[in-house]
Amino acid sequence: MTAQDFIPASYSKTVESGQFTWESPSNIALVKYWGKKKNQIPENPSISFTLNNCKTITALSFSKKASNKTFEFDVFLDGEKKDSFKSKIETFFERIYSYFPFLKDYYFKIETENTFPHSSGIASSASGMSALALCLMSIEKLLNDGMDEVYFIKKASFLARLGSGSACRSLEGDLVVWGNHSDVVGSSDLFGVKYPGEVHENFKNYQDTILLVDKGEKQVSSTLGHNLMYGHPFAEQRFEQANTNISKIKTILETGNLNEFIALVESEALTLHAMMMTSMPYFILMKPNTLEIINKIWAYRQSTGSKVCFTLDAGANVHVLYPENETTKVLEFIKNELVVYCQNGQYICDQIGFGAIQIN
Ligand code: PMV
């Protein structure tokens, strides 16, 4: 498929007004996306677990307006008008206008809320952009009778990607690949696809407890970080490594080898942060407590034989990943040894989920 395939020819119906609501989860990458080309095309393929509890719920109301010259919309977060979100959404609308020619025909009211706490350091862009893309797709489906489900989900992912790259991995579950890779049938740079390979029982209901180490605003946005991969001295090796890791994780997912899973996932997390530390300008998003937690996890694994491991996003928070059958023990370990490193003792218990759902 090419981007052209997402430009609609014409619509079969007209609609005056309506409302759609979708809830969409966040996701956590196992093989990371860091570095992009023009039009939000990733430099390397990535794979993520879809989360279950960290979600955005977005209601999109729309009504026909008299003029179709500009975008007109308002954004509300938890019932409060949020004009500070408008510029990001205006940019998103500009990017997707050629794929959604109806965007200037309606006034939109976007009402959104997250299930995770505000400014918890958990990025809401993946869940938020995918929920909004799905609401817009529901409108297009109304205008274009007979649109099939496969096209619906592909285009929603394609659009979510234009809002925030990793958002294209939030629509389905439990594992999603984004970025073309010869070992993953159907994979594409344009949208995320549900991982088509075999997945061992060991990875069913995998748990992710997110330790909130630092809830402050990130000092360096991911947009800026991605851009620093241009001219980065290790960029080519990194992109090659990510491609190799996709092949490796395919085997790991099939065989259920948890030791190899741990090695790959932790190496990916540290490589992501190593790229940040070796870019120019360089920066560090981990905090002292991030490292304390990592060391504690290593010591716990060493002394107990547990299969718990960690991964990191572009921030200081730590995602603690473990198989479902270790839940009681690992939660005990987290409470006894890790909570002290969390800001205000806060953490979120999540697990693998199965993607977005329509509410109405
Ligand atoms: O989707 P963005 O542009 O916010 O980039 C996200 C990048 C990482 O979260 C660090 C890695 C990933 O693959 O999700």
Image (cartoon, rainbow, N blue to C red):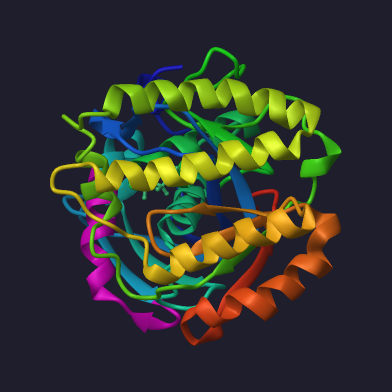
Residue lying furthest front: 303
Residue lying furthest top: 182
Q: Quadrant of residue 43?
A: top left
Q: Is residue 308 left or right of residue 191?
A: right
Main secondary-structure element of the magenta-colored stretch:
helix
Which residue corresponds to the image point at 30% horizontal and 35% vertical from the top-left? 35
Q: Nearer the viewer, residue 164 or 66?
A: 164
| Observer able to see residue 137 | yes
| Observer able to see residue 22 | no
Instruction: Report the label total.
Output: 0
From the image, which quarter does the C terminus lie in? bottom right
Which residue corresponds to the image point at 23% horizontal and 45% vertical from the top-left? 94
Q: Is residue 352 left or right of residue 129?
A: right
Residue 118 at x, y = what percent? 43, 78
Which residue corresponds to the image point at 47% horizontal and 20% vertical from the top-left? 180
Which residues fall within the magenta stretch? 77-94
Residue 110 at x, y = what percent? 40, 66
The reply to whether the magenta stretch includes residue 82 is yes
Which residue corresponds to the image point at 40% horizontal and 20% vertical from the top-left? 240
Q: Nearer the viewer, residue 201 or 18?
A: 201
Q: Quadrant of residue 334?
A: bottom right
Q: Nearer the viewer, residue 268 or 229?
A: 268
Residue 303 at x, y = what percent? 74, 59
Vertical arrangement, residue 311 with respect to residue 240, above or below: below
Residue 259 at x, y = what percent? 71, 39
